[in-house]
Image (cartoon, helix red, strand yellow):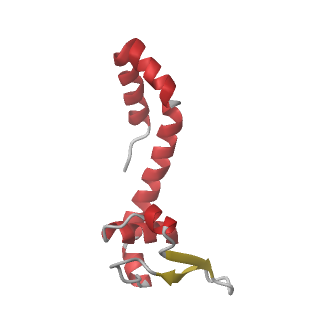
């Protein structure tokens, strides 16, 4: 089962919004329930998008799981790629070797 935040992200993306932009704008707020029942939406001010119901979020569980999985893959790849300055030097010295190394990283860390 995907996290509540991942479901919110899937819901926003399905409605043409970006979770990072909406977080930065303070368009919604999540809060832990004081009685231990988990996270809930305490504020929702996303322009043009209605607050999702729990049923709508639950329907996005599979998509949210894929988003979470792919985010982990992107993080792993980013770390394996290394510093961009060093990559540029590697490209300058031998672009084919760089391409081979990058493709090896992608092959070892496939997205869903």
- The quadrant in which residue 101 appears is top left
Q: Relative to residue 9, is residue 68 depicted above or below?
A: above
- The quadrant in which residue 61 appears is bottom left
Q: Residue at x 42, y 51 (%)?
A: 70
Q: Relative to residue 35, is residue 17 depicted above or below?
A: above
Q: Residue at x 39, y 42 (%)?
A: 110
Residue found at the very far front of the displayed protein: 25
Q: Relative to residue 32, is residue 82 depicted above or below?
A: above
Q: Residue at x 62, y 83 (%)?
A: 37
| Residue 27 visible here | yes
Q: Relative to residue 60, is residue 94 depicted above or below?
A: above
Residue found at the very far bottom of the displayed protein: 35
**Relative depth, front residue between 111 and 25:** 25
Residue found at the very far top of the displayed protein: 93
**Relative depth, front residue between 104 and 1:** 104
Q: Residue 6, image x and y in percent?
A: 47, 66
- The quadrant in which residue 40 appears is bottom right
Q: How many marks?
A: 0
Q: Residue 100, image x and y in percent?
A: 37, 22
| Residue 1 visible here | no
Q: Residue 106, image x and y in percent?
A: 39, 35
Q: Residue 49, image x and y in percent?
A: 35, 79
């Amino acid at each position: 089962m995907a996290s509540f935040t991942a479901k919110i992200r899937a819901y926003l993306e399905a409605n043409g919004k970006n979770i990072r932009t909406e977080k930065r704008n303070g368009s919604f707020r999540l809060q832990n329930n004081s009685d231990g029942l988990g996270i809930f939406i305490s504020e929702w001010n996303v322009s043009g998008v209605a607050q999702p119901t729990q049923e709508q979020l639950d329907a996005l569980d599979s998509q949210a799981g894929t988003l979470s999985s792919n985010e982990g893959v992107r993080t792993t790849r980013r770390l394996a790629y290394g510093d961009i300055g060093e990559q540029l030097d590697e490209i300058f010295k031998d672009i084919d070797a760089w391409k081979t190394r990058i493709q090896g990283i992608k092959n070892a860390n496939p997205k869903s």
